[in-house]
Image (tube, rainbow, N blue to C red):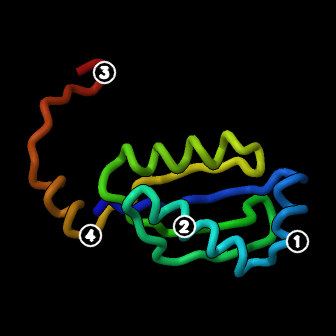
Amino acid sequence: MPKYLVQASYTPEGMKGLLAEGGSGRRAAVQQAVASCGGTLESMYFAYGETDLYCIVDFPDPLAMATVAMTVRASGALQSTATPLLAVEDIDEAAKKAVAFRPPGN
C-alpha cells in the first residue's frame, strides 16, 4: 500500500480541541478517519514548533489519501501536507528505468 508522511499544524480552534481531548483522543480520531478509507495509521507523534503533528499512514491508493486530506483540511482545524514515501526497493527499481531527457542547452 502507498505510504505517506503527513505533517500538520493546528489552527487555534484545532489546538483548543486537542487540549480538550488530549493526544489519545486525537489518535483515536485519526485512526478512525484513516480506517474509514481502508488505511492504517503506522505511527503518530506530536511535536512543538512550526509542525504540531507527524503521522505515517498507509492507504490502498492515492485517492484514499486525497479523500482523508480534503475532509480533514475542510474542517479548518489544521493545515496539513501529505508526502508520498518510497521504499528503498522502489528507488532501486526507478533507478533502473531509462528516461528520455535532454538538459537545457544540450
Whether pointer 3 and pointer 2 mark residues with C-beta atoms closer than 8 Å, the reply is: no
| Label 4 – label 1 distance at C-alpha | 38 Å
Residue at 57% across / 41% down in the picture? Answer: 70
Tell me where residue 102 appears, x and y as whole percent. 20, 26
| Label 4 – label 3 distance at C-alpha | 30 Å
* Residue corresponding to mark 4: 88
Callout 3: few (<14), some (14-19), or many (20+) C-alpha neighbours within 10 Å? few
Quick check: 22 above or below 15? below
* Residue corresponding to mark 1: 19
| Label 4 – label 2 distance at C-alpha | 29 Å
Quick check: 78 above or below 58? above
Residue 104 is marked as: 3
Of marks 4 and 1, which one's residue comes earlier in the chain?
1
Nearer-the-camera pick, 36 or 77 = 36
Of marks 2 and 1, which one's residue comes earlier in the chain?
1
Tell me where residue 33 appears, x and y as whole percent. 54, 60
Q: Nearer the viewer, mark 1 or mark 3?
A: 1
Q: Quick check: 45 left or right of 86? A: right
Q: Quick check: 85 left or right of 11? A: left
Q: Amino acid at mark 3?
A: Pro
Q: Nearer the viewer, mark 4 or mark 2?
A: 2
Of marks 4 and 2, which one's residue comes earlier in the chain?
2
Of marks 3 and 2, which one's residue comes earlier in the chain?
2
Of marks 1 and 3, which one's residue comes earlier in the chain?
1
| Label 2 – label 1 distance at C-alpha | 19 Å
Q: Amino acid at mark 2?
A: Gln
